[in-house]
Image (spheres, grey):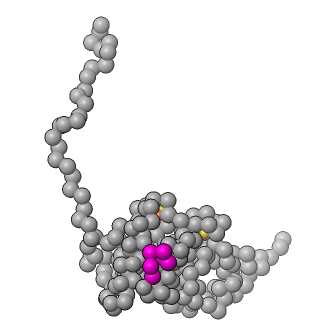
Amino acid sequence: MQTKHVRQIQIDVNGEPRSLSVEPRLLLVHLLRDQLGLTGTHVGCDTSSCGACTVLLDGRSVKSCTMLAVQADGRAVTTIEGIGNSKSLHPMQEAFWAEHGLQCGYCTTGMIVSAVDIIQRNPDPTDEQIREGLGGNVCRCTGYHNIVRAVKAAARAVRSGARRKSVAEVEPLTPPLEAPPVTGEGIIPHREPVGAGGE
Ligand code: FES
Ligand code: FES
């Protein structure tokens, strides 16, 4: 029987130094999700197309499905869990919420990580620069307009030195829709099917 080839690697994960045993063929995304339980990093395609698996490697966004875990040896990886959490939201997380930059949320963690990289490189990006920067992140739901608005809002917040908030402190900019009053108008009355009643 063949023995498994295992390599020992050192990675700083979300600010914590980790010593990890990995198979040389293990992808970084699987190390994060399956070995470290950091399931905020998603897998959408596995072919480097969707960006759901985006993390920061030494502060720069990379698709973690396109690199091996051993290639991260000696480097720093930041996942969405390291960007912020419900008690201390990164302005980008707050802005995605406030500006309705998500629907199903599947793309959102990768989208936020990429957007954080964009505003770290360019604190005041234009709409065009944001769209170009997010070119590797695909969203099936939102139509992208609110995502761009969210990135601009986050950039403004970071430039003004806004403090991080907890989930409980965030208010969406648009108030939730009120349910329309029930009037009975437009309701098709129930009718007995033709032939009912023993005809
Ligand atoms: S899962 Fe990595 S790009 Fe889609
Ligand atoms: S919010 Fe559903 S894929 Fe982007």
Q: Is residue 166 left or right of residue 65?
A: left
Q: Quadrant location of ligand 1?
A: bottom right
Magenta run includes residue 133 = no
Q: Is residue 164 visible?
A: yes
Along the line of sight, which residue is nearer the eye, 104 or 128?
128
Residue at 39%, 67% in the rendered image: 146
Q: Residue furthest right?
A: 1
Q: Residue at x 26, y 66 (%)?
A: 174
Which residue is found at the position 32% from the left and 15% from the top?
A: 194
- Asked if residue 148 lies left or right of residue 8, the reply is left
- Locate the C terminus by quadrant: top left
Q: Quadrant of residue 157?
A: bottom left
Q: Can residue 106 be seen by looking at this rendering?
A: no
Location of residue 198 with respect to 164 vertically, above or below: above
Q: Looking at the figure, which quarter contains the N terminus?
A: bottom right
Residue 128 covered by magenta stretch: yes
Q: Quadrant of residue 159?
A: bottom left
Residue appearing at x 41%, y 66% in the figure: 145
Q: Main secondary structure of the magenta part?
A: helix
* Along the line of sight, the residue nearer the viewer: 179 or 25: 179
Give 83 or 173, whichever is nearer the viewer: 173
The x, y position of residue 56, in whole percent, is 55, 83
Up/down of 111 relative to 17, above or below: above
Counting from the top left corner in percent of width and height, residue 122 is at 48, 87
Q: Quadrant of residue 77?
A: bottom right
Q: Is residue 76 left or right of residue 88?
A: right
Range drawn in magenta: 125-130
Residue 87: x and y in percent read 34, 81
